[in-house]
Image (cartoon, grey):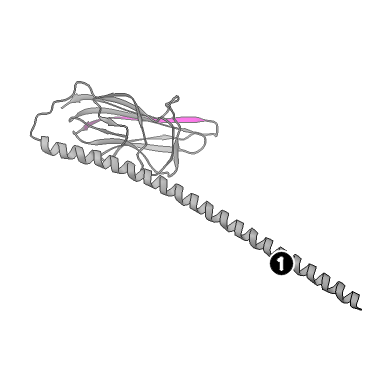
Amino acid sequence: MVFRFLVGCALISILHRNYVQSDDFNLQARIDQLEKKIEFEKESTLQTCKKMNAQLQEEVLSLRTIITNVQQNGTLTNKRQSPPELVAFTAYIENGAGHISNGQIIPFDRTVTNLGNAFNIHSHTFVCPVDGLYMFSFVVSHYGRGEVLGKLVIDGVNIVDAIANPVADDHDQQGVNMAVVQARRGQAVQVVNYLYNDAWYRTDEINRFSTFSGVLLQAT
């Protein structure tokens, strides 16, 4: 009788220990799962903040350029323009452009030509140095299914648009457009992504598929 009692106690002890261990294991698994979820949310929030910060810095640089030129124009309105001999540029993107938001300036950050130094690689903006007749062109490139749309704007006003919309996963496509416009000194000319968020433009230092160019045809 005593033996049976001792055996029963031993069995109860073993079952209790296994139950506690099982609870501990389940609790630890839940803790691990929550920690992974928190870490993922932190990383996702951090990446979103970084992207928003980069976009805001880009917009601030663009606005500073515009304000500086407006201020300069205000002090020089009664002075005769002294146009530079040549104004022309071609810009491209050095390392590709991804996660571009709707309304964001496409970040052309390198130049092949920048005669007159009117194109700013930091604000990705061309500022007209004189009143005149200008010609601008741009190319947007995309690889794989989906599409990207870019538009040429002057002081935020849409001039012309281009679209790249490959028909298959292994296809490239380029969208091209150009415009001849009368522009005033100090006006800002940019190529802006629109319609889609998280757009990706195919281009790099070797394969300069996406470009932005302009030239002063005649000062007026």
Residue 35 spot, x, y in % from top left: 56, 56
Element marked by disc 1: helix
Image position of 56 (left or right of 43): left
Image quadrant assignment for residue 215: top left
The extreme top residue here reads: 85
In the rendered image, residue 24 lying in the magenta stretch gets the answer: no
Image quadrant assignment for residue 203: top left
In the rendered image, residue 173 lying in the magenta stretch gets the answer: yes
Image position of 186 (left or right of 98): left
Image quadrant assignment for residue 201: top left
Residue 12 spot, x, y in % from top left: 80, 72
The residue under the point 40% across, 38% down is 149
Looking at the image, residue 58 lies above or below residue 34: above
Dot 1 corresponds to which residue?
20
The residue under the point 8% across, 31% down is 79
Image position of 32 (left or right of 52): right
The extreme right residue here reads: 1
Residue 109 spot, x, y in % from top left: 36, 32
Please report the bounds of the magenta region as a residue range: 171-182
Q: Is residue 156 visible?
A: no
